[in-house]
Image (cartoon, rainbow, N blue to C red):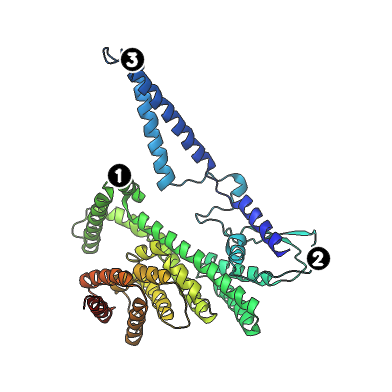
Amino acid sequence: MSSSRELQYLEYTYRNNRPTTGLLNSIFMTTVNTAARSLVSVASTASTPEIPSRRWSASDHLRFMSMMMTWLTLWILRVFLDYLPLPLISSSSSAYSYSYPPFSFASGLLTTAAENALVPAKASSSSSTSSTALVKYSGSSDLGMMICDGVDEPSVNSLGRALCHALALMNEIPVTSRKYQFAMGMAEKIMEDNAQSGHVDLLDVNRAALASSFARTTARLQDCLKRSRTADEPFGGLPLRVVSALPLGGYVASYVRGLSACINTVRSLADMTGNLLSQTRRRESAVVRAGGIQENEAELAVEKLAEELLWMTEKLRRYGAVAEGIKRWSYASGLASLSLTAAPRVQGLMVKISALLIGELARDSTQVPGQVTFRLLANWLPLFSHARNGLAFPVLTGYERVEVERAIDKAISTLPALDQEILLTNWLQDFSVSASEWPNLQPAYDRWCHSTRQLFM
């Protein structure tokens, strides 16, 4: 009964939230076929024996130009598919107007059940019912709809869905709203009551719901940082993305970004002094300052998601699911790279999350594969060295920094020699060019050198 119910959730959610870019893909494939046929036509014409001995006619030139235009159109469509995904949203799915993929309990809670992360499978002796209830959670465009069979029969999954609902609402409600604290309080109450019961299934509900919400919030934070980074680039970053797609374009794009940063710095200094600006520039600066409200809102949204991730990390540790948080944080390589250029407050929150997870990683009670340990350290150690100091208070106290260094040292010592070499080499490179004196992993580096030297003695 439980498995059939979960399959119905998955089937209904896929039917309502499946990708809507089929038309663009169809146009692309049609253009591919047309380009292939035009290439075959031109090649067959050029391969005839009499063609090399005479000039091309007007029809030959038109055929060749048509082929070139078709292939150019194909390339433009490929760029759109890779860098400008434009979902063709129909009227039936207009409720999902957000840029994030629609949240569904099937994709969050129920898929974790399929991975044995929610509730162990049990044989249900209750009779099946034919009643089907349609539940719509209004007030949030990310929540969608669910189909439930046998809602009259209480189950642990009901509490799981309620907890997922409260955690999802936290992502949706602005932090300035008084309802935000209400939603957070509801989620905390459900988790605390589940923990006080001491029942294994209820504890698993807390762990699975938190793990699912942690993954969703991580993806949203990465998307917000990526959008804010693109907004800072000229023309939304489209020219740089096109250049990066070309051979050796990554090198050119990096130089252009550096040049743009220098120009923006000079402009900001000129705005502050006001001596090098004309009256037109002053009016343009006023327009930019008027749009600063939207930029501040975007920064607040990013900081809100980072705060929620830190809150979820602490809850994962409290309810014994920190290993799941370590695993998911180790896969966030894209977020780790974006964090290097994030705002100082956001960087500080990510440093706290990484330090907390690495500290738990060094505990004997935390068991994770060596690959997870390597990914976690490789992705997030650079942030420790390159995080900017822009806060009025230290992100970590002196004692906490020493404890994190010890945890990193212990975690590195558990890895194979080759993995230790990669991590310590990268750390030495970052530590040498950074103004920060933390983390200092020289003892771990010396130990690795000594152990390697012993192999030849």
Kindly report which numbered mark, 2 or 3, lies closer to the viewer in this rendering. Answer: 2
Specify the farthest residue to the left.
Answer: 275
Tell whether label 2 touches label 1 (CB within 8 Å): no
Residue carrying label 1: 246
Occupied quadrant, residue 209: bottom right
The circle on residue 58 is: 3
The circle on residue 211 is: none
Q: Is residue 102 left or right of residue 288?
A: right
Q: Is residue 319 left or right of residue 77?
A: right
Residue carrying label 2: 127
Kind of residue sitting beneath label 2? Ser
- Secondary structure of the residue carrying numbered label 1: loop
Tell whether label 3 touches label 1 (CB within 8 Å): no
Front residue (pair 153, 450)? 450
| Residue at mark 1 to residue at mark 3: CA–CA distance | 33 Å
Q: At 44% from the left edge and 44% from the top edge, which residue is drawn?
A: 81
Residue 401 in the image: above or below residue 118: below
Kind of residue sitting beneath label 1? Leu
Q: Residues within 10 Å of mark 3 (few under 14, many from 20)?
A: few
| Residue at mark 2 to residue at mark 3: CA–CA distance | 78 Å
Q: At 61% from the left edge and 73% from the top edge, which residue is drawn?
A: 205
Q: Is residue 102 left or right of residue 326?
A: right
